[in-house]
Image (spheres, rainbow, N blue to C red):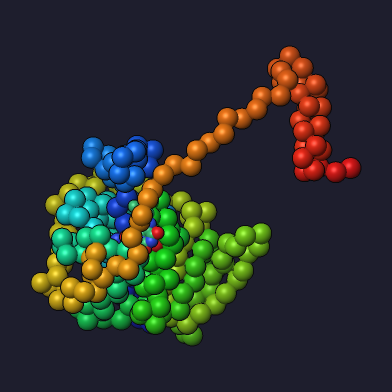
Amino acid sequence: MATHIESGLKNIVVAVKQVPDTNQVRIDPETGTLIREGVPFIVNPFDTHALEAGLQMKDRFGGQVIALSMGPPNTVMTLRKCLALGADQAILISDRMFGGADTLATSYVLTEAVKRIERENGRIDLIFCGKQTIDGDTAQVGPGLATRLGFAQLTLVDQIIDFSKESRTITVRRKLEGRKEIVQTQLPALLTVVREGNKPRYPTVPSRLGAETAEVTVWNNDVLKLAPELIGLRGSPTNVKRIFAPERKMGEILGDGEKDPRGAVQLLVQKLVERDLLSF
Ligand SMILES: Cc1cc2nc3c(=O)[nH]c(=O)nc-3n(C[C@H](O)[C@H](O)[C@H](O)COP(=O)(O)OP(=O)(O)OC[C@H]3O[C@@H](n4cnc5c(N)ncnc54)[C@H](O)[C@@H]3O)c2cc1C
């Protein structure tokens, strides 16, 4: 049930992408594309943490959580999972015209959807995205969305430290390579989250059952009315030329670590010294 604590949060949008379960993904050696037939789909793992972050903000500061996804019609299943976990609304952007989108076209369509959500629901305070997806892996959609909307963008967030209703600022910790950074910004803001930030909750049996029949709003391009040259393949200047798994060299086994660990370590040290990777 959505609540609106005065001066708290009003609308929190969480962008979720449905992705193939990468444990089961194979690449067609002829075409170099992903074989998607028969592959089970899952919610992009980073997006489960984005949803949890959004739900925690709602639990503490009110507002409603709206899960938003662009994808094929079966993405309804992904959005039902979000509803089972506590999202108040779910919106699917789906139309053949949106297919084949690169990150530029994806962020454009999602931006227009967010603007429509705002027109229908009022102010949007926060948008949560995953850090990246496990299929496209570009990590561009969140920043693209923030830039187009003119929202402050806080990427790689692993902790939400504080939200002030009075100053309408949010303070977060960013997980960077080798260091952490604490930053504060004014709302509205878009956050991309890493996995370490929270532990996604499990749906309850009643919420799961309720979500089975809950409404998922579907917007096609008759609803969004976006120019064909800005969406889908036509609106995508980037395309993937080739996908391939890099060849792996066989590893070298040095000595017999079980029978003679000391000898194996000596051989390893010798190799490292030879390659100038270890100096004394
Ligand atoms: C193997 C592969 C390689 C690709 N390489 C490229 C490439 O090099 N350049 C390029 O422009 N496109 C590429 N694409 C296309 C690209 O994945 C998608 O078209 C789309 O733009 C999303 O990009 P992403 O998956 O990299 O998302 P990311 O930018 O990694 O996603 C970050 C976050 O944005 C949100 N998000 C992303 N997509 C959606 C969505 N559809 N609905 C709701 N929220 C979403 C999620 O919160 C997600 O965690 C590739 C696709 C595949 C399968």
Taking the image in four quarters, ligand 1 sits in the one at: bottom left
Q: Quadrant of residue 277?
A: top right
Q: Quadrant of the C terminus?
A: top right
Depth check, front residue: 44 or 167: 44
Question: Is 132 situated left or right of 79 in this image?
Answer: right
Residue depicted at x 80% and y 21%: 263
Residue depicted at x 56% and y 66%: 174
- Let me know if residue 178 appears in the view: yes
- Let me know if residue 52 appears in the view: no
> Whole-percent x and y of residue 21?
34, 42
Q: Quadrant of residue 58?
A: bottom left
Q: Quadrant of the N terminus?
A: bottom left
Residue lying at the far left of the rendered structure? 222
> Whole-percent x and y of residue 17?
31, 57
Residue depicted at x 30% and y 44%: 31
Question: Is 187 situated left or right of 214 in this image?
Answer: right
Q: Is residue 189 above or below residue 75?
A: below
> Whole-percent x and y of residue 109?
26, 71
Residue depicted at x 22% and y 53%: 75
Depth check, front residue: 116 or 98: 98
Q: Is residue 237 above or below residue 149?
A: above
